[in-house]
Amino acid sequence: MTSYRSSKMYLVKRHHALTKSQGKVHKYLGMNIDFSETGKFKFTMVGYIKEMLVEPPEDMNGTAPIPAVSHLFDMNKTAETLPNYLSDLYHHNMDCKITISVQEG
């Protein structure tokens, strides 16, 4: 079994620094992680996304190729739609949509 001290030393060697935060709200990799409500937590990236949109690089204009086949975005118009409970499960809030868009972008 690895001790806490040796695990910490391994992480410090690999990542150069460790930080510790306390409290109910934490910031990590552009995300706000909020544990204010008992039994729940919330991830948001609103500030991170606003910053990206306000300060884009000068050369960020035009188009760029994507490494995907062209039929990837074609819709099957005869496909059965999801039942409401599944649709709500996948698309229940904007945070999820924004997070997905950031990962895909």
Image: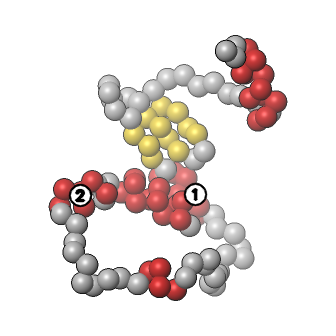
Task: Name the residue at 41% across, 84% down.
Answer: 74
Place of residue 2 in the rendered image (x, y in percent of width and height, measured from the top left): 69, 17
Badge 1 local density, few (<14 within 10 Å), some, or many (20+)?
few
Q: Position of residue 83 (x, y in %)?
A: 18, 63
Q: Nearer the viewer, residue 47 or 77?
A: 77
Left or right of 83 in this view: 33: right
Residue drawn 58% across the image and 57% down it:
51
Q: Nearer the viewer, mark 1 or mark 2?
A: 2
Disc 1 + disc 2, Cβ < 8 Å: no
Q: Quadrant of residue 1?
A: top right
Q: Which quadrant of the rendered structure holds the C terminus? A: bottom right
Left or right: residue 96 compared with residue 11: left
Q: Which amino acid does the dot numbered 2 rest on?
A: Leu
Residue located at (74% from left, 29% from top): 11
Residue 12, image quadrant = top right
Instruction: Please name the residue that numbered disc 1 is placed on.
Output: 51
Q: Amino acid at mark 1?
A: Glu
Q: How many marks?
A: 2
- Left or right: where 57 falls relative to 46: right
Tell me where residue 8 appears, x and y as whole percent: 72, 21
- Sequence-earlier tag: 1 or 2: 1
Judged from the image, the secondary structure of the residue bearing numbered disc 1 is: helix
- Image quarter for residue 79? bottom left
Q: Which residue is mark 2?
A: 86
Q: Nearer the viewer, residue 41 or 48?
A: 41
Vertical position of residue 73 compared to residue 47: above or below = below
Q: Position of residue 4 (x, y in %)?
A: 68, 15
Q: Is residue 50 visible?
A: no
